[in-house]
Image (tube, grey):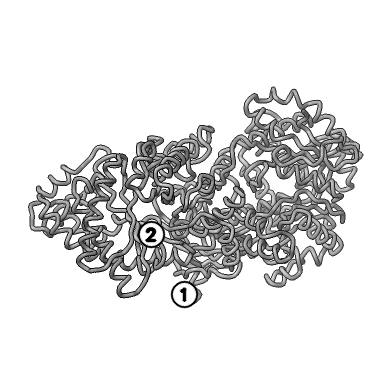
Amino acid sequence: MTSVFSFGSSDVPEGQTGLDKQVLGGKGANLAEMARIGLPVPPGFTIATQECLAYLEGGRSSFDRIRDAVASALGQIERATGKAFGDASDPLLVSVRSGARVSMPGMMDTILNLGLNNATVAGLSQSSGDERFALDSYRRFIQMYASVVLEIEHALFEDALDRIKEDRGVAEDVDLQADDLRELIQTFQGLVLAHHGSPFPQDVQEQLWSAIEAVFRSWDSPRAKVYRRLNDIPADWGTAVNVQAMVFGNLGDTSATGVAFTRNPATGDRAYYGEWLANAQGEDVVAGIRTPQYLTKAAREAAGARLPSMQEAMPQAYGELAEVFELLERHYRDMQDIEFTVERGKLYLLQTRSGKRTAKAALKIAVDMVEEGLIDRTAALRRLDPASLDQLLHPSLDPDAERVVLGKGLPASPGAASGGVVFDAETAARRAELGEKVILVRHETSPDDIHGMHVAQGILTARGGMTSHAAVVARGMGRPCVAGTSTLKIDPVARVAEVGGQRLEEGAFITIDGSTGEVFLGELPTILPELSGDFATVMAWADQHRRLKIRTNAETPVDCAMARRFGAEGVGLCRTEHMFFDENRILAMRQMILADSEEERRTALDKLLPEQRADFRQIFEIMEGLPVTIRLLDPPLHEFLPHTDSEFAELSRAMGIGVERVRHRATELAEANPMLGHRGCRLGVVYPEIYEMQARAIFEAALAVTAEAGKAVFPEIMIPLVGMPRELETLKDALHKVAEIVFTEQGRRIGFSVGTMIELPRAALVADEIAVSGEFFSFGTNDLTQTTLGISRDDAARFLGAYVDKGIIAKDPFVSLDIDGVGRLIEMASRKGRETRPDLKLGICGEHGGDPASIAFCEEIGLDYVSASPFRVPIARLAAAQAALTAA
């Protein structure tokens, strides 16, 4: 089977069109499709993704099987263009680009102008009639090739370029003359010799194969691995290589290059959105090397920009481009991200793909396209990324807050963020790991900054435009970004910046607003988002299609109210231990733990009873009419005791007992492995009075709410860490005895249920026996993952990244459910439990309850609900709808 596929020429072999992205990658498939429907695409060929995997396994020897096919495909380009590769009089030049099956902006490598050497540059000068253009293309090629293929530090060439511009007294690359560029080429070739140990390669065939190798190699680059891990892209997909005849946007003022979207990727508005540069090549726009101009007159006027838009400067080419926008959007039924070049007035298309967009834009585009009749509701739901909704659910800047504006750049990715200034990705990652909020401040970002961008609250750059690397990646990540802040001056060595006359040392707090492009001094207050309009429309569509119920993990009134506002249909996990750490309660809790007898413990617990009752009452009132699953005390008791000498002394004084007694009790309770120690139901078995107090608080609160507020209350009491059927049976009997006492005291009754959290493999194995007593199962997937894999969630970050990179596991099992292991246990426990109790209610309440892939599995095996943190409830609603559509 062939692995090399041609496009864009009249002699494309039969059967080499219509292939999918798995084979051709996204870029290759779309180039072939655009050529097929008659758009002006420069001819080229694609080397299939499978060859990337073959190279990564076998090295250059894998090239032997495709050399003839590449030579044949290259010949087709030569015939289509009338030029010859390596011809000293009229050379064919090509670009070599990556192309994974999904868009990975800036993650892998591109080389332009390949085929130039000391001989062909003269031929290009003669055939084009423009010596400066030829020399400019050559210096660009040397710089790209040296960086990507020879892996020489990119900054060395940038420094040389800056020096010659400074010597000549010019600000822009385009102001350098032919003699300047000739000197720069010599400088660049000297850098290659000095840092690579051999001259810049003159053999164009060696250039081509080395470039192909570099693109394949870039699939496994550190930045690509990070991006794949963050976006759940499998390592075994590989990347295709696209080799395409060059067209030149740097052939003078009648030539240009640009990036455009058929709709606004930040807001979703139906307006063309993009940037262009005259006399430039594509990397100048996307890499932020030059700040580009606006595509449309309306955008230029709205921004108050002086330089003309493409619509004004090149009306004919712009008109052709606008027609292409409409055609491609109708053809692909989605907003498109397009790269184009104009060579001496003629328009060429270099790429189209479904454009990266913010969550706000994604919702608007989906709703608008349904209304326009381009897609139906199910298609709209399927294409939305549930995880991206997180962007919409967090606060934005309070419009009434006092603010000191430091500067303004381009509103590259919406949302507001505050943090301490950091100047490199490594510092961002280090400080974020310590729990600090940071804003990554750079001249411009590069693909190597991906790990810092991921952990930063937001990104601020001095250079670059709305389609720069910073803007595109930030939008995809949902990070606020302000780009092209021209008044921002950065000294990365001194680790200081200046903007608006304000000196900002590393760590100084600033706030950025990616919706307006403004930069503010200090940390500004925020307000909650409005969840109406397109968001409400999409959520309503999702609710019509999903089967799974969506609950929340919450134990405070604030979290419960927020979750209900986000559409939660009950509480799936109320962790009662969080209620005891309040400073007004912790002393009574510690008195209970330090007690020497059951009587002393009950006396301390009596002090906690009113507090627990008040907690549950508030939650029942907020969640009126919805089920509330309350997990009784789970962690080991030593977690509530102090740890330092000063804390021991303080507790000793408060309780009026000797400090040694406090210290002795803490030592007595210490465990070698607390996660598998005296916790969960084991506490209830040994100290039944603890669970009895909590049960009384639940029943009394529920009765009070039904009596005084007339609200329906549905408490579900969950016994944690059950592994033996007798544990649940014993504790359920005790809870029912408390219920009878309270119901008798008050002369009224309410319904309730008792179930368990399945978080041990043994519980899954004997689920049929546990279901005799258990009226519901809630799978605690956090601990079930730990106990099944034998991996501590707290320590796993040290090595799980390497496991993903090496292909041992596909994803972090604490982020997305381990289907083959933990998932099989859940499936088995569900089946066995319902064999005993057909009406057994089943759900999950670990962090996986907000993960779309895990939700899809829950739909597949027929669980009743998933429970997620409040901010992930809308994510779960959409993911559950997508899972139901897939299963249908």
Secondary structure beneath label 1: loop
Q: Residues within 10 Å of mark 2 (few under 14, many from 20)?
A: many
Secondary structure beneath label 2: loop
Residue drawn at the location 25% of the way across and 58% of the way down: 695
Q: In this orientation, which residue lies closer to the viewer: 195 or 768? A: 768
Residue identified by numbered label 1? 401
Q: Is residue 849 left or right of residue 337?
A: left
Amino acid type, callout 1: Ala
Amino acid type, callout 2: Ala
Could you say which quadrant of the image residue 146 lies in?
top right
The percent position of residue 812, horizontal first and vertical second, equals: 48, 41
Q: Is residue 739 left or right of residue 563?
A: left
Check residue 554 in the rendering and tell me which mark sits there, or answer none. 2
The percent position of residue 297, horizontal first and vertical second, equals: 76, 69
Q: In this orientation, which residue lies closer to the viewer: 885 or 359? A: 885
The percent position of residue 840, horizontal first and vertical second, equals: 41, 49
Q: Is residue 13 left or right of residue 340?
A: right
Q: Is residue 446 left or right of residue 778?
A: right
Relative to 762, is 749 above or below? below
